[in-house]
Amino acid sequence: MSIIVDPVQESSFEKPDRSQLWYRRLLANQQFLLLLVTIAIFVFFAFNRHVFASAGEFGNNVTNFCTLVLLGVGETYVIATGGIDLSVGSTVSLSGVVGAIAMEHLAMHSELLVLSVGTVVCIGIGILVGVVNSALIHYARLVPFVATLVTWGAGAGMCLVLTGGAPIGQNSGAIALTVPKIWIFSYPALIIIAITFVAGLFLHLSRFGRFTFAVGSNAFAARAVGINVKRQVTSVYVLSGALAGITGMFVYMRLGSGAPTAGTGQELIAIAAVVIGGARLTGGSARLSGTVIAAWMITIVSSGLIFMNVSPNYNQVAVALLIATAATAQALRKSARQSS
Amino acid sequence: MNKESLTSGAPTRTRWTGAKAVVAASLAVSSIALVGLGSASVAGASSSKKITIAFVVGAEADPFFISMNAGAQAEATKLHVDLIWQGNPSQYSPSTQIPVVQQVTTQLASAKPSALVLGPTDPKALEPYVKVAVKKHIPVFNVDSQDASLKNITGFVTGNNAQGGQAAADALAGAMGYTAGKTYNVVVGMTSPTATTNVLRYDGFKAEIAKKYPGIKILAEAYSQSSPTTANTNIQNWLTEYSQSSKTPLNGIFAIDGTNAEGAASALQAGGLACSKTVCGSGHVALVGYDAYSSNVSLLSSGVFAALIAQDPYQEGIDSVFNAYTYLKTGKLPKGVSKTTTLPNVTLLPTSNSTFLAKYTYATA
C-alpha cells in the first residue's frame, strides 16, 4: 500500500474495461450488491407483512435511519483516515442531555429559539468531544481506539452525573416536529438527508476528501506531499463529533427529552454500517454511498424483525451476519482484482 | 499500514506509542472502576463504636436507587448510624457488583463493621460473597432483589412486582373502558425477556388479564434493551402495524419500566394517538407505565399516561436500615417484621393529588 488509493482514481484507472465488461464491473461493485441485497430484504419483509411497504412504515424507517446515518457518515470519514471513533454513541446521549438542560432553562421563550439554542449546544458538545479526541490522539499520543474509548466512557458517565439517571425535560412541540410532514419525511429528517448528501459530495469530490483518503492510505506519503496530517485528522474527528451532536438533537426531538442512555450502543451500529458499506478499517478506502445503503439496510432489518416479532437478540445476529458477508465479499473482490 | 504511525510521526516511536497506549488503557479502566467506587457517598466511618451499615446496590445512578439512598440516609441520620453507600453507576450486572462487594467487605473487616445490605444483581452470583461476609460475623440483608437462597440472609425488604403487574392490568383495563364481550388489543414494551423485575411484573399482568379481562389480547412484546430510543422505535412500528384503521387496532400499551414508558409516551405523542386528560376513547391508545421519573409524572398530569405504577424505594431504604439497626441492637428483627417484607407498588393516576404524586416521584441526585 505505497500509493494513495483513492476510489475515484481507482475507477478512472479501470476505464477501458467499461464497455465490454459492464455487468462484471457492476457485480464486482459492493455498493451495487448491497443495494440488491437491501431490496431483497425489503421485498421479503413486505411480502410477509404488507404494511411494511406502506408510507407510514417508510416514515418510521426514515426517522430511525436519521438517528443512525450521520453517525455512519462521521465514522466513514474517520475510518477513511485509518482511525475509529467509539465515542459517537455517548456523544449522542451527552449532547442530548446537555442540550435538554439548556432548553429547560429557556422554556419560557419561543419554541424556535429554544430548539435553535438546543441545536447549537448539541453541536457544540459534539465539537468539544471531537477536539478532546484529537487532543488525546495528538498530544497524549493515544491510538484512536483508546482515545475515543476514553471519551466514550467519560461521556456516558457525565450523562449519569448530569441527569441522575432520569430523562430531562418534556417537549411535546419537539416530538411533533419529527412527524413526517412531506410524504415520508419530517423537516429535521430532510435536513439530515441533505447533510448526508453534502458530506458525500465533500468526501469524494473535494480536496478535503482527497486529503482524508491520503492520510488513511499512507500518512508518511501524505506528509511528504505537504498535507498537514495533524490538522486533517483533527478536522475529521471534530466533524464526526459535530455530526453526533446533530444526531443527539434529533434523538432529543424524537423522545421529547434528553435521556442518558439515548445513544447507548449506537457507535457499534455506525461502525457496522461503514464496514458493511465496503470501507477498509485500515483506512484509505471508503464509499459514503455504501455507508448510507448499509444504514438503510440495518434500519429495515431492525424494523422488519420487530414486525415478525423476533427477539432483538436475533437482530444483533443478523447484523453480525451482514458484517461477515460484507467483509468476505470485500476480501474475495480484492483477491479477484489481484489475480486479474 | 500501521495505525500508530499516524500519530507518532516516526516508525521508531511506534513501540513507545503502543506502550503508552497500554498504560493509558489501564488508566482508563482503573478510572472507570474508580468512578464506580468514588461516586458513592461514604459517610464518615471515623468513630469505631458507631454502627456502620454498608449498602451495595446495582445501578447507583438510577433514580430508583437514588430514592432508596435518600430513604436510607434519612433513617441512618435519625438513628445516628453511619451509612456506606456503594454501587456501579449504571451497569446492573454481577460482574461490576462483585468487586464492589469484595471491596466493601474487606473495608468493613478493618473498620469493625456492623451490617451489609445488598441488592444482588444476580440471584446466584453474589451468594459466595454473602457467605464470606457472614463468616466475618457481618449480618447480611437483601433489598429489592434477593439471593436464590435466603439461608444466609437475615432480612429482605422488597417491592411487590407481581402485584404491580396486576395493578397495571387493572389500570389499563379501566383506561380502555373495558366491557365484557369486547376485544381489546394490547402490546407490552419490555427491557429484556429475562430481567427478573420485568418477568415478575409481566407474569402479574398476564395472570390478572387471564382472571378478570378475557377480552384483552396481548398481540406482542418488544424489547428495548434499556434504550429509550429503541423503545420508541418498537412502539412506533407497532403503531403502524396495528394502526387504528387496521383489523387489529391497538387499544393499549403496558410499558414495563421507566425507559419503555419514555419511549412509548413519545411515540404515542408523535403518532397523535396519546390520550389527553379529558379524552381517551377510540382513536387513542391508553398507556400504563412503570416508574415515577419526574418527566413521566408530568406526562401523567397531562393524561398521556392513564396510570403510572410506582415502587417505593424510599421506604425500602428506611426499612432496610431500621431492620439492620434493630437486629444489631437486639439480635432480632423489629417486632412484627417477618424475614421478608413486601411493600406494595402504588398506582398513580392523573387525578391523584400533588402531595401523593410528590411522595412517590423518584428523587434525582
Image: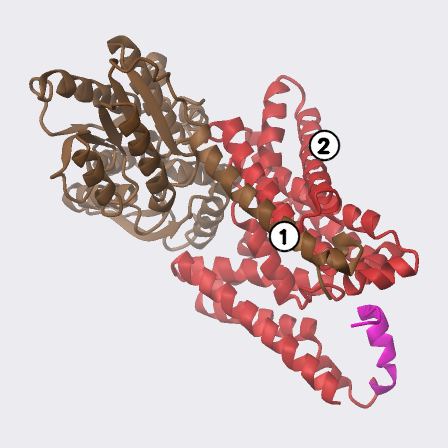
Chain colours: A red, B brown
Examine the rendering and report whether any part of residue B355 can be seen: yes
In the rendered view, does B166 fall on the left or right side of B365?
Answer: left
Q: Is residue B104 above or below residue A66?
A: above
Query: How many residues crowd mark 1 within 10 Å: few (<14), some (14–19), many (20+)?
Result: few
Pinpoint residue B17: horizontal percent, then vertical percent: 68, 52
Callout 1 amino acid: Ala
Q: Quadrant of the C terminus of chain B?
A: top left
Please state which of residues A118 and B3 is positioned toward the viewer in this rendering: B3
Q: Where does residue A176 sit, x and y in percent of width and height?
A: 58, 36
Residue A220 image-quadrant placement: bottom right
User: Image height check: is A35 above or below B57?
Assistant: below
Q: Do dots 2 and 1 share one subunit?
A: no
Q: Identify the image quadrant of residue B48.
A: top left
Circle 1 marks a residue in which chain? B
**Local SS, label 2:** helix
Which residue is painted at 46% across and 44% down in the image? B227
Q: x and y percent of residue B220 in the render?
A: 34, 53
Q: Amino acid at mark 2?
A: Val
State yes or no: residue A8 in magenta: yes
Q: Using the image as rendered, state which of residue B9 and residue A313 is in the foreground.
A: B9
Name the residue at the right extreme. Answer: A226
Question: In this view of the protein, which residue sits in the foreground, B345 or B331?
Answer: B331
- Separation of residues labelled 2 and 1 (CA atoms): 39 Å
Q: Which chain is home to disc 2? A: A
- Report the disc number at residue A120: 2
**Residue that label 1 marks:** B19
Specify start and end residues of the magenta stretch as a single range. A1-17
